[in-house]
Structures are given as structure tokens and as C-alpha cells.
Image (cartoon, rainbow, N blue to C red):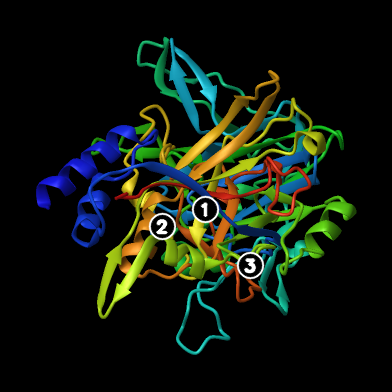
Amino acid sequence: MKHNLSKLFSLSLILSLFFACEKEFSELGSGIVGAPNIEIKTQSYPVKSYNKRITPFQSNGLPKNLLGYHKDPVFGPTTVHFLAQLTPRNYNVNFGDNPVLDSVVLTIPYAVKKSDDEYTIDSLYGEHPVKLSIFKNNFLLRDFDPNSDLDENQRYFSDGSLSSSEQLNAADMEGQLLYTTSEFFPSNEEIILTEVNDEGETETSATLTPSLRLKLDELSSLPENFWEDLILEKEDSDELSSANNFYNYFRGLYFKVEAVDPDNGHLIQLDFASANAHVKLFYNYENTGSDGGTTTKYSTYDMAFSGNRVSIYENDFDASILQSIANANEQDGDERLYLKGGEGSMAVVELFSEDESGNDFDDFITDFRENSGDEILIKRLVNEAYLEFYIDEAATGSDADHPNRIFVYDLNNNTPLVDYFLDNTVNTTTSDSKYTHLVPVSTETDDQGTEHKKYKVRLTGHLNNIVTKDSTNVKIGLLVSSNVGAADMRTLQQYDENVEFIPTGTILSPKSVILHGSNSSDELKKVKLKVYYTEPTN
């Protein structure tokens, strides 16, 4: 019997058009019933999918942050601002005798790729400039929530709120204006820093990757000696003696974005958490030597973005799209699924929902296993199971810039599905991964030569766990993602029984796509669960 079962598993693997985890096959071997003759079969099971709006999410402490203005062709405009504390790298600093400020420089690296000695900016959406203004923030970003009973950390949400009853104060955030331009657009050129050596010659002192780099001390409207009074004159003061004192004294920067052209703009992902993201005061001071002589010394006062960092989203979405999402048919499923990152939209997917013929989850279980007392007897082996989501190109346009990836997760437990962890595929040139479980957008050609774009999500391990381990048939969340590897979850301010968290990869994606849902009028493109299985025959 063991020999025959071994043949059965080997032949199943060979005949299957798609691979499944070998570990899963070996585990299934102990419960198979029937003779060792095999036949590969396929069967579709009903699925229900419907829309769900993404409500404001916790936006402080993100690994990266979007900044800019982007008009999505389906949903409409989104503007993303940024608010952050600055943290000195050193405290109780001695600025020396007669310090003189030279400049105040802000540096924030872009996410970039390099090939053939050229840089390409990653995660840049749009090709047109926006207006960028940077203010001294006067709103205190507290660390702890005073309304909590257990000194919980304060959460800040994407709509600019701290809770359902407390908002960030825009007037406080827009304190002293430090910088403004109506022509901000990121450059992919590396930044060459120079200095004058002892011989009076200019030489390269450092080379930086493409970054947002600008001066915060050159605006004509800036009060005289603003930075000197703010920092240099505070030597030996309590304000510069600790992080908490400094946060209360200098409450950080507010990056405000406005559209230059309401139809165009750009969003870019910035790495504020990088060690190379900082504000530096460059200054010189007099140094008296042991011989009484005086020389000029140069130094910097460094402040990093290592405190609270908050992204603030403003949306002006199309009213008809929002109404379609609000009218989601949770009973029968939706015709179209509207997916968008940020404060956009997602879908809920329910496997084995009852179809018009009355087929449901119990029919699937009966097809694949029998219960004999406490023992589960397997009647069929799941070789592969997947969902296919076809893009509704009539609604989005065939030449639309569709998201490359979508993401699914267990809504009951707010974790990726088991297939996510079984998938070891990794793209060596980016942080993206999981190409077997979450297949990137692809194109198929039908018998008439017509091309159709779709996403494919493999759920083989998930179904095997349901069959062999009696795992729960959970509801599944479906979203777009800028990076499926960014699967850590962020809480929603207002959530319901279906959705409490969304992944970071969705927050950092401004793109959208419209998919055929489970109630689509196109029978070939409506969402179905397709299962390839091996069944012994006598």
C-alpha cells in the first residue's frame, strides 16, 4: 500500500500543471482511501466577493512615507502631507566660542535602483511637479495616549486625527514657513558634495544617492537669526538636554503639498527612517589653542527623523465610485471590485459561498474527505487551487497603469495565508517577492486572439489545511500592494467585524484597478475558485 501511495504522489506531481508544496503531499498520504489508480480532475467552487471602503488607518511609524499629489484615473485626487518630529543626535552640545551659522540643510533619500552608473527612482507615481512648503510645526506630537488606561502609545491616523474626537490642528502645524517651491519634482541625479582643502582647492567630500536636499535658512521671509536663536543660542539650556524637552520645544517639521495642476502631479516614496535622513546645522566657531592662538573650527548639529512620523491623506474621490462601494452587496456579491491603495478600497472574498444550485462549503468538504470517528480520511488530493481576478478593462481602459501586484490575507486573524509563508520566491533586484502565491498581473490570449489581463492567487496550502487539518474557512481580504513583502498590519480607526487592519504595502500604493467580481455579467471572468485534484479510481 505504501509503495502504491508513493507512486500516486509522484505521478500527481508530474501530471500537475502547477507545483504545490511537497510537504503538503507527504502529509496527505496517511489518509488516502481507494485504489491507487489516478486521474487528474478539475472543479470550480462558488466564491462571493464584495467591496469594502478602507477607512482612516494608523499612519505613524510607517517604514516609508508617501509625499505629493496624484490624480488617480478612476478614483480621483489624493494629496499626502507629512508631519514629523526631529531628534538631536547629541544633547548638551557645546557649540564653541562665537558660533556662526553657515547653513541649514535638509536631506531625505529617495528609494532608488542603480544600473550602468545611472539611478532610477523607485516608487515614483506621476511625471509633473507639485508645490511643496515646509513649516516649523507647533503641534505637540505626544508619545502616549492620555485617554488609555495602560499608557498606550498615541496613534495618529491618516485623516489627521488622533481619535474619533480629536484632530491635528492645521493652524498649529503651519507655523513659521521655512521653505517653499512650486516646482518640486525629484531628480535622479546623484549629489556631489565638495569642500575646500588646506591648499585652497575644491575637492569631492561625499557622494549621495538621489535625495530631497534643500536649504531651510534662505527664505527671505525668515526672521533674522531664526535658526541661531532656535538652536545655537540655547547652549546649556534644558531645551537641548533631552529628547522629551526638545520635542516640546522644537516640535518638528510639516511638509505640505498642493497641486500645481489639478490634473497632474506626482507622489514619491521617501525614506524618512533612513540614517541619512536628517536636518543639519552647519556652523563654525573659534577655537583657542594652548598657545593662545585662535583658529576657526567647523561642526554640525544633527537632527534625525527618529521621533513620531505621521502621514496625512486628503482625498477628493469620485462620488459615483464611492457610492458603488457604499452599496456593496454582501448578500450576493458585487459585479465589480474597486481596489485602491491608501484610504481607498478593498474587497472581501468568501470561499464556498452558496451558489444558485445550493452548493456550498459542506459540498466541498464532502467531496474531499470523510470523517471516520476522530480520523479524517482523504478522498481527493488538492494538487492546486487558485482564484483568478480579471481586470475590467471596459471600466479602466486597456492602457491604464494597473498595479503590478495584489495581496490577500486572513481577515479573521489579520495574517497572510499559509501559501504566503510556503512561497520562497524572491526577486533579487527588489524587495518584492511571493510570485508563486501572488502572481503579478499577466496577459492571456483567448481563442479569438483577444488579450485579457488578470491576477492569479494560489491557495493550495490554504485549501489543504482546510481539508486535512480542519482549518477555518476564513474570509479573505483582497487589496492592491506596492510591495507584497510589506505585510505588517496597520490598525483602522473605525473597523467592523470584517476588516480591522490593512497591510503596509497597501498604504504605500496609490494605484487602483477595477476587477470583475463574483456577480459579474461576464460568466467567463467572474471570480471562481478553481481546484485541480487527484482522485483514486477503481
Q: Nearer the viewer, residue 369 or 411?
A: 369
**Residue 284: percent from left, percent from top:** 45, 36
Give me the residue at 72% from left, 80% from top: 165
Q: Residue furthest front?
A: 538
Determine which residue is flagged by label 2: 463
**Residue 388: percent from left, percent from top:** 58, 43
Determine which residue is flagged by label 1: 408
Q: Is residue 261 visible?
A: yes
Identify residue type, mark 3.
Answer: Gly
Looking at marks 2 and 3 on the same chain, the residue that comes earlier in the sequence is marked by 3
Determine which residue is flagged by label 3: 358
Q: Residue furthest bottom?
A: 149
Q: Is residue 293 above or below residue 365?
A: above
Looking at marks 2 and 1 on the same chain, the residue that comes earlier in the sequence is marked by 1
Q: Is residue 452 above or below residue 190?
A: below
Q: Nearer the viewer, residue 265 or 489?
A: 489
Identify residue type, mark 2.
Answer: Leu
